Amino acid sequence: MKRKFLLLSPALLIGLVLGFTITLAWSSFLFAQSQETSTSPSLEGFKMEDAVINVASTTGKAVVSISTEHTAKVGGGGTKRFYFNSPFQDSPFGNDPAFRRFFDDFFGGMPDREYKQMGLGSGVIIDPEGYILTNEHVVEEADKISVTLPDGRNFKGEIKGKDTRSDLAIIKINSSNLPVAALGDSDSLKIGQWVVAIGNPFGFAMENPEPTVTAGVIGALNRSLGRSISRERDYNDLIQTDAAINPGNSGGPLVNLKGEIVGINVAIFSTTGGYQGIGFAIPVNNAKRIISKLIEGKKILYGWLGVTVQDLTDDLAKHFGLTDKNGALVAGVLEKSPAQKAGIGEGDVIKQFDNKSVNNVRELLNVVGRAEVGRKVKILVMRNKQELTLDVEIGEKPEDLEKIATQTSSSGWRGLEVEDLSSDTARRFRIEEKKGVIVVNVESDSLADDAGIIPGDVILEMDKQPVKNVSDFEQITKGVKGECLIRTARGYFLIKNE
């Protein structure tokens, strides 16, 4: 008997150990499950779901579809018509000007043809009397505007006011007691905050007037697209989001989970033309500043100093004797500009504007653009390691600013426009010269054009005098009375007298 007990004892011990282990594992599993249930984000998920549903059912009722129609002409007089279905376009004579003139004279001009361009976008009702906020580019050249509400009703839209720089517009429909969306505060946005984009992607192709809702987070603030999309529009203070924004969403609202408008959807970043995870919206506070003026049809004025500025690097800050990189370095001052009249000069570092700190170029552009035209403000600059306070009267930004800026950097002498040979222009024209001035434009049928000079030429000498920069170019051209021999990197050219 003793022997049998000894034989059974290991089996019994193993059974007891296995039973205890299974019991302990099961207890641990149940405990983990109870902990997971108590800390599970599912409850928060339901709150998020409820918030999006509420936004869709309330703010969504104020989001409209906008369809535009613009009549354009193509074809018509002149030699350009031969690029449209010319029977000789593939022949050796098809691009010969003399042959094209002969064909025109013999067969007569082809008539202009009209075709209709259709546009699609979104908008949001901000007043029960039918005032709708949208993008300016949605209604930019529209001859006819049609607005469809989520309930299917259709109205004719009328542009009350628009502003190209901000890319915002107000259109009006003849109705009342309409659902509206409240304007929120875009200055209080935080990166990572949940937002909802509402609009009509692909517009009426969906054959459904109800808007589409997509959710995401704020990915970044104060994003700048520079002039990658439009030279006329200012995309320097945008909200970036991963809430899906597709073609047709432009002009629709970006809202917080309270249903308040925090932005107006404006663009997507895409290599294919479709949504790829990054969208942009105009901060609603930018719109709030000008909505009343747009409704009244008034021109939107923007403040202007008349300077070209750049951000500071560590090396530049050290060179100018600064302890940090905060500020905007003045690289150029336009003639007769508010900045020049106030005494601001090249090499000054703007540290404060109207008693507010300026940390970089973007901040300076924002505060100057929002400043009231005609108002006098104080600007603190660092000059020769010394602080200097200057009084400047804010001017109105000229509509032909590009032309003004070009004329200050080049003379336009005999049809030539030149710039200093910087690393950027050298890279743009793919040249290796280290000195001289570069031709950036040649006026058609000008004396320079007749001489054979083209954009990208680097001028090294004029009238046997070296040209190192624009200042040398302008000084020499002032004294030239007759023909002028010019040496470029391509060779010599003779520009005749006017």
Image (cartoon, helix red, strand yellow):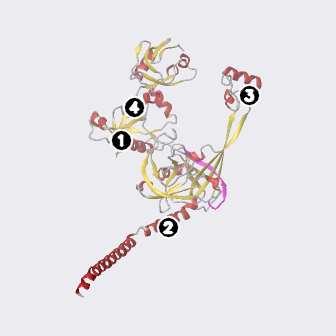
Residue 239 at what x, y percent from top left? 46, 51
Amino acid type, residue under disc 4 in the picture: Gly
What residue range appears in magenta?
Answer: 150-163
Residue at position x 50%, y 61% from top? 259
- Magenta stretch: includes residue 154: yes
**Residue type at mark 3?**
Gly
Residue 194 vs residue 122, the one in the foreground: 194
Instruction: Check the image and name the residue furthest to the bottom.
Output: 1
Q: Residue at x 56, y 61 (%)?
A: 60
Q: In the rendered view, does 120 fall on the left or right side of 244? A: right
Tell which tag, 3 or 4, sits nearer the viewer. 3
Q: Which mark is residue 378?
A: 1
Query: Dot 3 corresponds to which residue?
Result: 109
Label 1, residues with CA under 10 Å away: few <14, some 14-19, many ≥20: some
CA gap between label 3 and label 4 equals: 50 Å
CB atoms of marks 4 and 2 within 8 Å:
no
